[in-house]
Amino acid sequence: MDPQRVVLAGHSGAGCSLNGGLATADAAQTDLHAIVVIDTCMNGPFGERMAQVSPETHVVVGYQKLGWTREFKPFEHMFRKTVAERGPATGVLRELDMQTPERDFHNATVLISFERWIPKLLELPSTPHSEADTQ
């Protein structure tokens, strides 16, 4: 395992709480190269939290709006606002990827996100975490 290339992906319920799952993943002792958020609960506070992860960690959010009755604007707004205020390091991604799967909308986002983003993320150089991040 290359410790500079750890990519964590979470789908659905992995992003529905600020007290666990993807929201607390960057507190782990292992530095993350990237977090791929896939069609989670998509509320405003979670959008803000995903934009606040370590500035050296890439964050890509793959999601779809088909079949849901929930509102996506709070997530999108808080994610974009927080990225604008606390942007990542140079060359580090903070991406919203709204997808339009043809069927099995919710589950199809997993394969779409993996095919679209994992190769790209693994080609991007790792940004060394600061010494403060490792203490």
Image (spheres, rainbow, N blue to C red):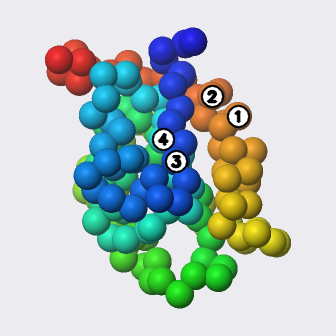
Local secondary structure at mark 1: helix
Nearer the N terminus, badge 3 or badge 4?
A: 3
Decide which of tag 2 and tag 3 comes sooner along the chain.
Answer: 3
Foreground tag (1 vs 3)? 3
Residue at image mark 2: 122
- Label annotation for residue 119: 1
Location of mark 4 (residue): 35
Q: Which residue is mark 3?
A: 10
Task: From this view, report whether residue 8 is shown above or below residue 116.
Answer: above
Residue 49 visible within the image: yes
**In contact (CB < 8 Å): disc 2 and disc 1:** yes
Crowdedness near tag 2: few (<14), some (14–19) or many (≥20) residues, C-alpha within 10 Å:
some
Confirm or deny contact between disc 3 and disc 4 (CB under 8 A).
Answer: yes
Residue depicted at x 37% and y 71%: 43
In the depicted structure, whether residue 29 falls above or below residue 87: above
Q: Amino acid at mark 4?
A: Ile
Q: Earlier in the sequence, mark 4 or mark 1?
A: 4
Q: CA distance from mark 4 to mark 1?
A: 13 Å
- Asked whether, in this view, residue 3 is left or right of residue 44, the answer is right
Q: Amino acid at mark 3?
A: Gly
Give yes or no for contact between labels 4 and 1 (Cβ–Cβ under 8 Å).
no
